[in-house]
Image: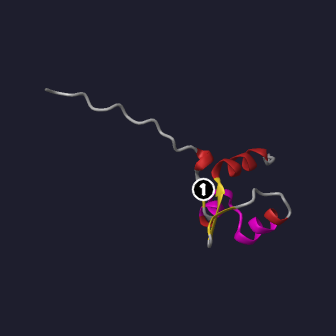
């Protein structure tokens, strides 16, 4: 007897649950490490989230909202 394969599982992975580490954040934003930390201290950049005792990361969705809110340059 032939059975149908199970339907594909819905993806539960969303950008809200995606964390980016500092190297990915610098590539995404074009900002340097010290600039990112300075902006975090000035409350002008999303704060990192503690992932473990020695690791932090940023929510991708927070970075995308921050990026969308930035003014665009017109030349």
Judged by its main secondary structure, the magenta piece is helix
Residue at screen point 62% across, 71% down? 53
Q: Is residue 60 above or below residue 5?
A: below
Task: Please report the residue visible at 83 percent of the width from the left and 57 percent of the height from the top.
Answer: 44
Q: Secondary structure at mark 1?
A: strand
Q: Choose between 9 and 21: the one closer to the eye.
A: 9
Residue 26 located within the stretch drawn in magenta: yes
Residue 75 seen anywhere in this rendered image of the structure: no
In this orientation, which residue lies closer to the viewer: 31 or 65? 65
14 sits left or right of 73 in the view: left
Task: Work out whether 57 lies above or below 71.
Answer: below
Q: Is residue 35 left or right of residue 64?
A: right
Viewer can see residue 25:
yes
Q: Return the x and y of residue 68 as percentages of the image width and height.
A: 74, 44
- If the image is split into quadrants, where does the N terminus sit? top left
Which residue is the extreme one toward the left?
1
Please give the name of the residue rendered at 66% of the width and 47% of the height, measured from the top-left corner: 61
* Total marks in image: 1
Front-most of residues 29 and 16? 16
Residue located at (16% from left, 27% from top) = 2
Tell whether 56 sits left or right of 3. right
The quadrant where residue 21 appears: bottom right
Colour setup of the view: secondary structure
Magenta region: which residues?
24-38
Q: Residue 3: x percent and y percent?
A: 21, 28
Q: Quadrant of residue 30?
A: bottom right
Q: Position of residue 55 (x, y in %)?
A: 61, 69
Choose between 32 and 47: the one closer to the eye.
47
Give above or below for 32 relative to 9: below
Residue projecting furthest to the right = 42
Residue underneath mark 1: 19
Q: Residue 58: give x, y in percent of width and height.
A: 66, 58
């Amino acid at each position: 007897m032939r059975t149908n394969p199970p339907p594909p599982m819905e993806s539960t992975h969303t950008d809200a649950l995606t964390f980016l580490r500092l190297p990915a954040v610098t590539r995404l934003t074009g900002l340097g490490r010290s600039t990112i930390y300075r902006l975090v201290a000035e409350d002008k950049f999303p704060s990192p989230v503690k992932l473990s005792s020695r690791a932090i990361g940023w929510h991708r969705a927070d970075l995308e909202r921050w990026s969308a809110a930035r003014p665009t340059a017109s030349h």
